[in-house]
Amino acid sequence: MDDRQIMENILLTTKGACDLYLHGTIESPTAKVRQAFSTALNNTLGMQDEVYKQMAAKGWYPSEQATQQKLTEVRQKYSAQC
């Protein structure tokens, strides 16, 4: 397993943890439990962001800039549905 695969696994794991913490936050029965999940979610989102930045810096997570035309098309599509 190379570094890229390790980073991809870490990213997938942190994304999965974020999903679990989000649902825990939403479904929490008390304020203290909700706060615990919310704190864990925010910390994990920070970890996910750092992993993403490192992967992007190495070219392992390429992304492309959306054009203004594409943004307009998406806006129009969803505006029509509302």
Image (tube, rainbow, N blue to C red):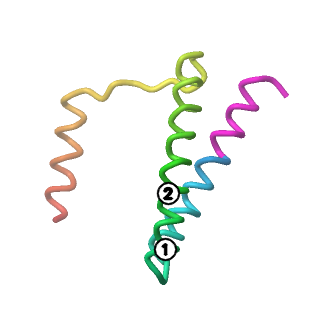
Quadrant location of the C terminus in the rendered image: bottom left
State whether the magenta stretch is mostly helix, strand or loop.
helix
| Residue 53, horizontal then vertical, whole percent | 52, 26
Q: Nearer the viewer, residue 34 or 59?
A: 34
Please name the amino acid that badge 1 sits on: Lys
- CA gap, disc 1 and disc 2: 11 Å
Q: For this view, does 46 lie left or right of residue 51? A: left
The answer to whether 31 is drawn above or below residue 19 in the figure is below
Displayed quadrant of residue 61: top right
Report crowding for label 2: few under 14, some 14 to 19, many 20 or more residues within 10 A (C-alpha). Answer: some
Q: Which residues are magenta?
A: 1-12
Does the magenta segment cover residue 7? yes
Displayed quadrant of residue 12: top right
Residue at x 75%, y 30% (from the top left corner): 5
The answer to whether 23 is drawn above or below residue 9 in the figure is below
Tell me the element at label 2.
Answer: helix
Residue indicated by mark 2: 39
Which residue is situated farthest in the front direction here?
32
| Residue 64, horizontal then vertical, whole percent | 40, 24
The answer to whether 30 is drawn above or below residue 4 in the figure is below
Residue indicated by mark 1: 32
Dot label at residue 47: none
Between disc 1 and disc 2, whose residue precedes?
1
Residue at x 55%, y 62% (from the top left corner): 21
Residue at x 15%, y 56% (from the top left corner): 79
| Residue 63, horizontal then vertical, whole percent | 45, 26
Q: For this view, does 17 lie left or right of residue 36? A: right
The answer to whether 66 is drawn above or below residue 12 in the figure is above
Q: For this view, does 65 lie left or right of residue 16? A: left
